[in-house]
Image: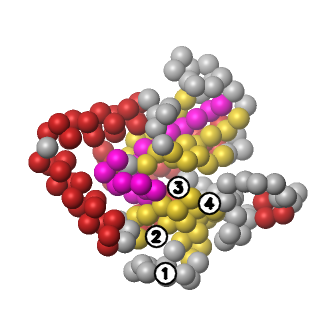
């Protein structure tokens, strides 16, 4: 089998996500629970820590393809996040809108921004679910929610897919306050 780096067509290359100060080890634990391998790129850029490459296929640790990166949030976005947090505390209308968004992300994730990881089988998705529930659910409580849609479920979007939607705020490619969905997908 060829590696993804040998593929000749266009493909999605990477996503970059961030973690909060002090949560690097938690971010690593989360992506490892997803079944990914983590390597340190050695690249620091303007940040505090080096970037970590997250490999969905642990057997292919190419740092440039089929990868997403995680690094600590930078000070400019941290300032925006802090302002949004204060707005959420001060403005009950904003807080209600945000809570409604977060609830929809947990219960009706279709149409909510996300990125997806592909798994070989629904058993692999179940194994990820078990790891997340065993190692992270009790510690993260309201910061993490996993819902799995299976073929034949009344509210499933596609009959040939098992889709797990992990809503969390440990690693995000947007706002921590809004959280991030990661889809765990397999095709039947």
Residue 15 picture location, percent across and down: 56, 59
Q: In which quadrant of the rendered image does the N terminus lie?
A: bottom right
**Mark 2: which secondary structure?**
strand
**Mark 4: which secondary structure?**
strand
Residue lying at 54% horizontally and 16% vertically, measured from the top left: 154
Q: Nearer the viewer, residue 129 or 20?
A: 20
Q: How far is mark 3 from mark 4, CA to CA?
A: 19 Å
Q: Earlier in the sequence, mark 4 or mark 2?
A: 4
State which mark lies toward you, 3 or 4. Answer: 4
Residue lying at 43% horizontally and 44% vertically, measured from the top left: 167
**Circle 4/circle 2 CB separation < 8 Å:** no
Residue 68 picture location, percent across and down: 58, 62
Q: Is residue 138 visible?
A: no
Q: Earlier in the sequence, mark 3 or mark 4?
A: 4
Which residue is denoted by mark 1 in the rendering?
A: 45
Residue 19 picture location, percent across and down: 40, 64
State which mark lies toward you, 1 or 2. Answer: 1
Q: Earlier in the sequence, mark 4 or mark 1?
A: 4
Which residue is denoted by mark 3 in the rendering?
A: 33
Which residue is denoted by mark 2 in the rendering?
A: 71
Residue 170 on the magenta segment: yes
Quadrant location of residue 52? bottom right
Magenta-tinted stretch = 161-178
């Amino acid at each position: 089998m060829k590696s993804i780096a040998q593929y000749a067509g266009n493909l999605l290359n990477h996503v970059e996500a961030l973690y909060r100060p002090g949560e690097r080890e938690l971010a690593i634990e989360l992506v490892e629970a997803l079944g990914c391998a983590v390597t340190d790129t050695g690249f620091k850029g303007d940040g505090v820590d080096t970037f970590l490459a997250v490999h969905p296929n642990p057997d292919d640790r190419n740092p440039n393809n089929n990868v997403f990166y995680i690094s600590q949030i930078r000070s400019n976005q941290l300032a925006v996040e802090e302002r949004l947090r204060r707005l959420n505390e001060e403005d009950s209308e904003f807080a209600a809108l945000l809570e409604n968004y977060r609830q929809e992300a947990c219960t009706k994730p279709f149409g909510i921004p996300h990125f997806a990881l592909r798994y070989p089988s629904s058993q692999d998705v179940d194994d990820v679910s078990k790891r997340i529930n065993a190692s992270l659910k009790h510690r993260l409580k309201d910061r993490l929610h996993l819902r799995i849609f299976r073929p034949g479920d009344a509210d499933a979007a596609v009959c040939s897919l098992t889709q797990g939607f992990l809503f969390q705020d440990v690693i995000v490619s947007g706002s921590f306050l809004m959280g991030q969905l990661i889809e765990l997908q397999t095709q039947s």
